[in-house]
Structures are given as structure tokens and as C-alpha cells.
């Protein structure tokens, strides 16, 4: 059904048919019962396995707010109808009004499947150990293929205690590598120094925006205009933009409202996406990893064709930008290279003409000229870039290139014009928050001196194997520092020197809330690494791809089995605030991560109070009580909730009555508060307006306070890290990306003989999952089969028909999938969806799940950015057929 939508092959009629089918299917998911995959109620079996979803007439239950907490950025409301500790049905936002400006926050097909995620029969029920693991005889090579034995929490805690003690006393610092933060509270309190990993995962190269003056750390809310202002654009020109798949919630609805207001869309993307179809966009197919070349060529056209300011906003450049030409050089730049002369070919003899870019990007030179003219100063244009095109190797200067292109047309700081990234939680909805979560206060936990040394994801598996790695984790530091704080971070390093790499004696791996064997580059090497250490612990909800390679696995509760919490407000639109309420008993013997750590900590003699003395409920109450919402005037704020003495009594917490916008009981039951918008309200936001109007009075966070076409600080940071050999300059320069289009040719010679891996592979974020999460849910497996998307021309050239089992091979690994042959993909590009749980055939070493990271490699470049979308592959027909994912049995362990 969903796939029919993808394959609508350009026909608007077909597309609409497909959309309706998908809507009907999603609606069906909300109300239908799930056949054999039914709910199992609780450890005590308070309701029979497979308790049916009752009809609307069910009485006596209660609606509880249970919004999704997963990392898809969808910000949607899920509600659960619960009776006697059993979920009887799910609902969503059906109480708010729904129009073009104010949308209901309706759940998607994943949200409606949440019950089979949070209460699925394949949830982990008990602590387990591998059958062939014992401290004296660990049989590490059997990780990933062994059977499992149920053990008690006490046994599990004793094993883990003994192994930590042994490993720590034998090898000392940095012998334990952790994935996710769930175990750090224990290691910190034990004063053990350990390792963790960092990645630019989402943002790719858009990740240190303070340095070039865009956004606040990794919070990109304030990097584009308010969504209602987008109705004033003539054009939205976007690079890699598919909210219809990768930003569920209302992002696509908001863009449809812009379209209805007359905005025209031009979308550069290797795929003719559902977003392009819905928005009637002009689709510009572009090769992955080459956006910088297209942007540079369009800047070149603006320079070439500008007649006395007909296209370029010279006044804006003069007042607000530096580094563009020799008369505007920032003081700190070490070379005298300026960007316009680079475009003209003054330094390398290569003018960055549309013809130069056509050969690299595959975009016809005339199209680049046409779009460049649209980007001239007389049109109102928003220039958006998703993170996907920045999740590519060697594009660390892409953000600068995009901002420079937008700045040349003056599309910054005024209504109807905006330049910045768009993806994930903030897609199509920007500006400071209108309703803010309060603070729960301290839990009273006490720390310890244990600290983590960070390793870049692109180096972790090699580090496990004993190779040296960069231990600075500068990404995390820059991210945590906020927009201005980058200057303090940088002052703590000597950027004139290369970072010193270190080695670590990694003997234990501990996975909590991360899915590294699914989401990190180089999973094939990852499997070897997991099998090379002495001890592996996993804890979570399922026997995920990563937990499967552990020796001991611990069952952890989901949010539905906890007190409740704010869904992190960073995950949400500026105009809504969701709250999550726990409602179920822990599933079988599962514990929260903290309870699990207390249990293990007790074996070391640590008291549970070290994990905090203020109850979760009290902190939840405090956070809700101190939440605030903006008033109509757009300036003053009031409490979000009103609280009475009775409420405080009912909660059983300490607190004071207060006045507020809505009664606390209503807010908790709805699970959502929305600030309603209307055109002309006081909540508008024009990004960088103050700066444009008065650049000296309102400098941005760059060194010079202006937009830096030449940014020495960024180049210095890049050059100090030691990931790339070739020096970075202050001005952006096109670099041939590792595993990019150029490498699909022998010796990188464009237009020459094709290499062994002649195709480019990208990883669209896919509806079945939020990353790895939900991959195991049978409903979703049926609705979203997770094929590999192949361009018709490429499939025909290889004798591949729709539905054939094919092997996708890179120099790093091989995986199998059913082919989905479509004309909606640019020839030369392969779309392998992000996030399946690896399933390796031990005999062949080939993955059966379509895991994209089983075929990516550990490649650290530039600033260690995640470059998933630059990968060269070959696709061939496979000799055997693989089953559809929906026919692969669930892993259900123990009753
Ligand atoms: N369903 C679902 N949604 C998700 C997630 C999920 O796992 N599942 N994950 C969420 C998270 S954490 C994130 S960070 C976001 C990511 O959000 P995005 O980065 O926007 O998502 P992608 O699907 O990777 O890519 C968007 C589009 O970019 C195109 N593209 C890929 N490479 C290039 C390139 O080099 N140049 C150009 N011009 N286009 C390119 C792809 O074809 C795709 O259509 O998605 C969020 N939304
Ligand atoms: N090749 C390729 N790789 C990619 C991407 C891509 O586009 N291409 N996208 C990247 C992006 S944008 C992102 S954001 C990352 C995401 O990478 P991850 O953060 O690793 O992905 P998730 O699947 O969200 O993993 C979360 C894991 O934690 C578990 N979990 C959830 N809650 C808890 C809890 O309370 N306790 C415990 N113990 N476990 C819990 C979940 O079950 C799941 O296994 O992936 C990146 N990887
Ligand atoms: Mo992400």
C-alpha cells in the first residue's frame, strides 16, 4: 500500500489513489486488531495473551497520554485507552481543531503500532545469558548465534559485577566501551574511566553552526523564518527534502499550506519523493554528495550574469558579509583567498561554471542557470537544505556554501526569505518556542569521578581492534556549548597542532540506549569487534541486532511503564508541548536503566540513594507546574497549568496551588497543549532580521560577527583533527568526496571506465522505523516491506526485475533485498532504507536484512562526520530468494 504511493510513477491521478490507500491503511492500523500478534498484558497475566481490542462501547477505562518518545522527530500525540492495566485501544489528537494553520498532531502508522512495540510478545522478559558463555569459558565467537538461558537479576548483577572488577583491575582506564548513557551513572559512581562514542549522525556537516553563525548548537529552531512567513515566499528551493517520509507529524501539511498560498517548489534530490509529488515541485535530480558543486555553480552564474545589482544584493554583502571578495576580508584569515575569486577559478584554474558542475552533479547546466536566476535578489526565496546531503564525506564546507549562495541574493533577514537547514524535529517549523517545558529540579543523585573519553563512531570498531583514535570528541563539546560557547571550547585547544591520537585496551562493550550494530558505519567490522572482546552486556527492550551479540542481556522498561516525562521539547514544534504518562506495570521482570544500575551497584556496595532521593513523580509534577506559555501579546508569559489543593493531594506530592492556562488534570489527560496560530498574530519570527537591519549592533556568533564566506575558525578546527590529510582553507572549496560519484570511475576519472562499484547508495529514512526502532513490529513489516529501490535503467542493465532478490555489495560488505524497480530514482543511484536489524548468514557472511550499515565502512574524514550517503555499490541478481520480512518469525524467548 505504502509502496504503491512511492511507485506512483509521476501520474497525479495514481498518486492520489495511492495516498488514499495509504491513509485508509493507516486509519485501519489504528482500529483493527492485530491478528496473531496481540497484546500480552503483564507478568502476572492480568489479561490473557492476545486480549482483543474492544469496541468503542468499552466502559470503565481511562484515556492516558502516551505520545511517541522515539527519535523520528514526528512530534505526534498517541493516547491509550487503559483498563485494569491493559491497553484496550489507541487514539490520537482528535480534540484540537484542524485547519491549514493549526493542525491536529495525529499519530502515524508507527505511533498506532506502539502497543506492539511497547508490549510486543518479543519484548525482553527476563535477564538472560548466552548458553555457551561462562566467565571461565566465554566462547566469544558464538556471539550472535548462541541460544539464551533465563537467569535471575541477582545472577546477572553478580556476573556483571565480577567481570567489571576483573577487567578494571587487569586493564585499568578505558577498558570499557559504552554505547548509550544508561550505564554511565554506575561507572561514574564507581570512579571508573571508560569510553563512549559520538557521532554527527543526524546533522552531518551542519553540526557546529555557532562557528559559522547559524543556529544554536544543534538546536536549529531559530535558523529559518516562522512557518507562516513562508507563505510570503515566491519559491522554496530545497536540497534533499522529503518530509513526507522523514519528518512525519505536520511538516508536510505546513508545506502544503505554503503551496496553497502560491509558493513554488524546486527540489534537488536523487529521488522524486512523495514530497515532490505532493508539492507539485520541479524535481531536479542530483547525484548524492555533489550539492556543493551545484551550489557553487549557481553562485558563479549570479556573479557572471549580475548586471549592476540585477541579481546580487551587493548592499547586503557589503554590510553583512566577509570573505566574499578582496575588499571584504576578515582580519583573522591566514591566506588572502576570497570566495568569488575561487569561483572564478583564480586559484585552481577551474572556473566553477554550470558545465563544470553538470559533469559532477548530473544536473544540466541550463537547469543550474535557470535556478540561479530564480535565486536572484528580486524573488522572495527560501533556500533550504536537509541534513541528508550533509551526511556525506568531505562536505564539511557545505553549510558555508549554502549560506553564501543564499546571502548573494540577499535572502536572509527579511520576510519571505530564509536560508538554513531543515530536517527532523524542526522541519518546516522554526522560531523560538511558544510553550516551554519547566524544570523538574535535581533528583538528588550523587556522582563519582568516573569520566568518559569519546570516540568518533567512524573509529569505534577500529579502536576496539586496537587502532589509535582521536579522543577529543570536539563535536560533543561544540554542540553542548551553545551558539556563542564555541569560542570557549576552541580556546581550550591548541588548534595549530594536530590532535594526538591514543589507543585503548577495550575488553568490554556495554550497550544501553543505542543501536550501534544497526546505526553506526561498518557493522560488518562491528560484528568482528563485538566478538573480539572479553565481555559484552546489552540492555533494552528487545533482542536487537546489537543485544544479540551480548553475553548478558537485561530487560528494560519502556516509557509506558514509568512515571511519565516530558517528551523532550527539542523534539517538538514550537507551538506544542507534549507530556507522556506512564500507565502500565513493568513488563515481566524489566527494570528501568537506573534500577538496573542500582541492582548491579548494590553488588559493589553502592546505596540506591546515590541514584537520587527526589521521586520521579515529584519531578514530573515540578516540571509541569513550572511550564509556561506565551500570551497573545507575543511578549509576556503565564503558567501553562492551574493547580488546586485537590490536585496536589491527588498527586501525593509537595507543591503550591497556582493559576494557569489549563487545569493540570486536563493537560495530563490530553497529553498535549497547542498554542493556536493565525496569520498576523504576534508570534512571527524572521531569522536574522535584527542582524540584517543593524549588523554592528546585532553581530552573529562568528569570529567577525558577520556571515563568513571565509571562516578561519572552522578551517582551523577541521585541520587540527587529523582525520583528513589535505588542508582545509577558510573559503569553501569543492573536495572530491570519499566514496562519492568520482570514485565510481576507475582512478576517479569522470566519464572514464566504471569501477567495480559503479552505483551510489543513499539511505532514505523509512516509514517502517524510527531508525532501528519498530523494525520488528509485524504490522509495520507488512505495511512497509523495506525493499531496495533501483532505478529502472540500472535494473534493466543488470537483468533485474521488480521483486527479484538482489545482492547489494560495497567494498565493506554485502546485503540482500527484494528489488523495487522505479522510474522515480535517478539512474546511478540506489536507495537502501535506513535502520534494519542485521541478520547475518554465518555461512556466507552476507546480511539478509538489507542493513545499510552492514555495507558502509569506518571512514573518518574532515571532522569525523557521518557520511552514510556517500557509498559506492554494485547490485546483482542473487541466486536464492529471500523471504519477505513479514514472513520472518519474531524472536519470542520464554513465556
Ligand atoms: N520515518 C522516519 N522518519 C525519520 C527518521 C526515521 O528513522 N524514520 N529519522 C529522523 C531523524 S533522527 C533524522 S536526523 C531525519 C533525517 O532527515 P533527512 O536528512 O531529511 O532524511 P533522509 O531521508 O535521509 O533524506 C531526505 C532526502 O534527501 C535526499 N538525499 C540524500 N542524499 C542527498 C544528497 O547528497 N543531495 C541531495 N540533494 N539530496 C540527498 C534523499 O533522497 C531524501 O529524499 O529524519 C527523521 N525522520
Ligand atoms: N547508514 C546510515 N546510518 C545512519 C543514518 C543514515 O541515514 N544512514 N541515520 C543516522 C541518524 S540521523 C541517527 S539519529 C542515528 C540513530 O542511531 P541510534 O540512536 O543508535 O538509533 P535508535 O534506533 O533510535 O536506537 C535506540 C536504541 O535504544 C533502545 N532504547 C530506547 N529507549 C531505551 C531505554 O530507555 N533504555 C535502554 N536501555 N534502551 C532504550 C531502542 O530500543 C534502540 O535499540 O542513526 C544514524 N545512522
Ligand atoms: Mo538523526
Image (spheres, rainbow, N blue to C red):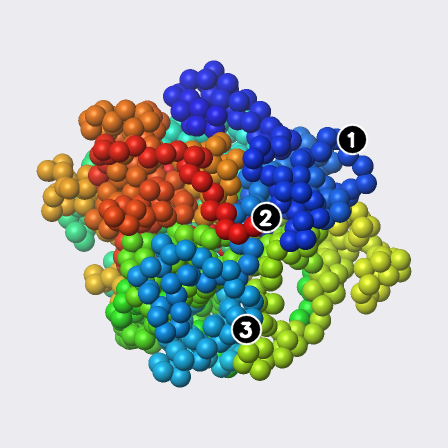
Quadrant housing residue 465: bottom left
Residue 315 can be seen in this image: no
Locate residue 53 relative to residue 70 in the image: left or right: right
Q: Residue 600 carries which label?
A: 3
Report the Cα–Cα distance between label 3 and label 1: 46 Å
Q: Between label 2 and label 3, give the one nearer the viewer.
A: 3
Say whether residue 605 is left or right of residue 300.
Answer: right
Residues packed near mark 3 inside 10 Å, few (<14), some (14 to 19) or many (20 plus): many
Disc 2: residue Cβ within 8 A of ligand 2's nearest atom: no
In the rendered structure, find residue 57 and report the number of the disc placed on it: 1
Count of marks overlaid on the render: 3
Q: Residue furthest top?
A: 13
Q: Where is residue 770 in the image (x, y as percent from the top left)?
A: 49, 45
Residue beneath the point at 59% across and 59% down: 590
The percent coordinates of residue 473 (x first, y second) are 39, 68
Residue 860's spot in the image, x, y percent?
29, 59
Amino acid at each position: 500500500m505504502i509502496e504503491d504511493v512511492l511507485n506512483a510513477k509521476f501520474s497525479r491521478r495514481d498518486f492520489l489513489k495511492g495516498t488514499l490507500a495509504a491513509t485508509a491503511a493507516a486509519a485501519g492500523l489504528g482500529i483493527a486488531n492485530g491478528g496473531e500478534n496481540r497484546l500480552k498484558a503483564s507478568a502476572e497475566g492480568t489479561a490473557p495473551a492476545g486480549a482483543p481490542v474492544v469496541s468503542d462501547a468499552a466502559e470503565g477505562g481511562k484515556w492516558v497520554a502516551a505520545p511517541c518518545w522515539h527519535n523520528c522527530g514526528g512530534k505526534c500525540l498517541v493516547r491509550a485507552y487503559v483498563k485494569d492495566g491493559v491497553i484496550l485501544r489507541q487514539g490520537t489528537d482528535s480534540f484540537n481543531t484542524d485547519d491549514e494553520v493549526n493542525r491536529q498532531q495525529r499519530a502515524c502508522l508507527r505511533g498506532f503500532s506502539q502497543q506492539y512495540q511497547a508490549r510486543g510478545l518479543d519484548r525482553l522478559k527476563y535477564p538472560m545469558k548466552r548458553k555457551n558463555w561462562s566467565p571461565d569459558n566465554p566462547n566469544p565467537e558464538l556471539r550472535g548465534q548462541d541460544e539464551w538461558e533465563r537467569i535471575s537479576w541477582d545472577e546477572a548483577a553478580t556476573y556483571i559485577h565480577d567481570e567489571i572488577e576483573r577487567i578494571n583491575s587487569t586493564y585499568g582506564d578505558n577498558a570499557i566501551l559504552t554505547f548509550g548513557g544508561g550505564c554511565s551513572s554506575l561507572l561514574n559512581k564507581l570512579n571508573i574511566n571508560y569510553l563512549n562514542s559520538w557521532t554527527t549522525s543526524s546533522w552531518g556537516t551542519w553540526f557546529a553552526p555557532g562557528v559559522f553563525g547559524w543556529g544554536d548548537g544543534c538546536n536549529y529552531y531559530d535558523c529559518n523564518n516562522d512557518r507562516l512567513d513562508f507563505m510570503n515566499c515566491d519559491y522554496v528551493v530545497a536540497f534533499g527534502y522529503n518530509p513526507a517520509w522523514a519528518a512525519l507529524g505536520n511538516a508536510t501539511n505546513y508545506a502544503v499550506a505554503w503551496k496553497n498560498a502560491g509558493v513554488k517548489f524546486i527540489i534537488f534530490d536523487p529521488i522524486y519523493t512523495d514530497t515532490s509529488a505532493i508539492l507539485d515541485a520541479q524535481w531536479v535530480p542530483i547525484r548524492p554528495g555533489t550539492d556543493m558543486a551545484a551550489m557553487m555553480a549557481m553562485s558563479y552564474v549570479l556573479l557572471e550574469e549580475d548586471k549592476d545589482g540585477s541579481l546580487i544584493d551587493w548592499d547586503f554583502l557589503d554590510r553583512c558579509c566577509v570573505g566574499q571578495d578582496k575588499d571584504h576580508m576578515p582580519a583573522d584569515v591566514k591566506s588572502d583567498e576570497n570566495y568569488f575569486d575561487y569561483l572564478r577559478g583564480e586559484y585552481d584554474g577551474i572556473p566553477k561554471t554550470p558545465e563544470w558542475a553538470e559533469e559532477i552533479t548530473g544536473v544540466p547546466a541550463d537547469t543550474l542557470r535557470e535556478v540561479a536566476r530564480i535565486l536572484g535578489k528580486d524573488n522572495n526565496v527560501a533556500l533550504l537544505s536537509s541534513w541528508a546531503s550533509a551526511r556525506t564525506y568531505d562536505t564539511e564546507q557545505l553549510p558555508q556554501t549554502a549560506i553564501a549562495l543564499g546571502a548573494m541574493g540577499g535572502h536572509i533577514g527579511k520576510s519571505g526569505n530564509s536560508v538554513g537547514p531543515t530536517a527532523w524535529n524542526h522541519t518546516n517549523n522554526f522560531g523560538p518556542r511558544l510553550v516551554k517545558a519547566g524544570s523538574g529540579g535535581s533528583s538528588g543523585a550523587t556522582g563519582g569521578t568516573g569520566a568518559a573519553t569519546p570516540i568518533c563512531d567512524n573509529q569505534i570498531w577500529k579502536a576496539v581492534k586496537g587502532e589509535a583514535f582521536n579522543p577529543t570528541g570536539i563535536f560533543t563539546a561544540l554542540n553542548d556549548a551553545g551558539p556563542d560557547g564555541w569560542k570557549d571550547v576552541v580556546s581550550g585547544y591548541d588548534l595549530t597542532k594536530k590532535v594526538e591520537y591514543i589507543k585503548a585496551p577495550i575488553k568490554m562493550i556495554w550497550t544501553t540506549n543505542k543501536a550501534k550494530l544497526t546505526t553506526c558505519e561498518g557493522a560488518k567490522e562491528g560484528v568482528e569487534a563485538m566478538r573480539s572482546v572479553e565481555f559484552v552486556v546489552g540492555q533494552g527492550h528487545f533482542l536487537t541486532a546489537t543485544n544479540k551479540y551480548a553475553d548478558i542481556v537485561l530487560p528494560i522498561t519502556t516509557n509506558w511503564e514509568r512515571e511519565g516525562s516530558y517528551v523532550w521539547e527539542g523534539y517538538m514544534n514550537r507551538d506544542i508541548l507534549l507530556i507522556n504518562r506512564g500507565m502500565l506495570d513493568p513488563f515481566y521482570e524489566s527494570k528501568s536503566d537506573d534500577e538496573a544500575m542500582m541492582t548491579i551497584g548494590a553488588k559493589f556496595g553502592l546505596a540506591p540513594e546515590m541514584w537520587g532521593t527526589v521521586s520521579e513523580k515529584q519531578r514530573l509534577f515540578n516540571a509541569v507546574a513550572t511550564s509556561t506559555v506565551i500570551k497573545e501579546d507575543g511578549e509576556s508569559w503565564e503558567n501553562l497549568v492551574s493547580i488546586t489543593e485537590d490536585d496536589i493531594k491527588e498527586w501525593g506530592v509537595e507543591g503550591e496551588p497556582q493559576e494557569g492556562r489549563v487545569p493540570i488534570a486536563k493537560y495530563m489527560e490530553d497529553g498535549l497543549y497547542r498554542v493556536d496560530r493565525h496569520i498576523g498574530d504576534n508570534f512571527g519570527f524572521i531569522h536574522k532580521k535584527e542582524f540584517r537591519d543593524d549588523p554592528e549592533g546585532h553581530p552573529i556568533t562568528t569570529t567577525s560577527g558577520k556571515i563568513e564566506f571565509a571562516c578561519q575558525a572552522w578551517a582551523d578546527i577541521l585541520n587540527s583533527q587529523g582525520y583528513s590529510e589535505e588542508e582545509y582553507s577558510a573559503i569553501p572549496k569543492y573536495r572530491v568526496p570519499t566514496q562519492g560519484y568520482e570514485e565510481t570511475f576507475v582512478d576517479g576519472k569522470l566519464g572514464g571506465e566504471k569501477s567495480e562499484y559503479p552505483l551510489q547508495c543513499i539511505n532514505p529514512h523509512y516509514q517502517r522505523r524510527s531508525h532501528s526502532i519498530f523494525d520488528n513490529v509485524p504490522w509495520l513489516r507488512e505495511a512497509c516491506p523495506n525493499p531496495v529501490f533501483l532505478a529502472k535503467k540500472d535494473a534493466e542493465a543488470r537483468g533485474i526485475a521488480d521483486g527479484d532478490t538482489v545482492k547489494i555489495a560495497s567494498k565493506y560488505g554485502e546485503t540482500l533485498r527484494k528489488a523495487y524497480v522505479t522510474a522515480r530514482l535517478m539512474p546511478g543511484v540506489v536507495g537502501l532504507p535506513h535502520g534494519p536489524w542485521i541478520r547475518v548468514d554465518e555461512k556466507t557472511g552476507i546480511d539478509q536484512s538489507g542493513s545499510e550499515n552492514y555495507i558502509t565502512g569506518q571512514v573518518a574524514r574532515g571532522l569525523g562526520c557521518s557520511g552514510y550517503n556517500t557509498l559506492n555499490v554494485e547490485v546483482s541478481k542473487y541466486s536464492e530468494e529471500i523471504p519477505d520480512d513479514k514472513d520472518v518469525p519474531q524472536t519470542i524467548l520464554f513465556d
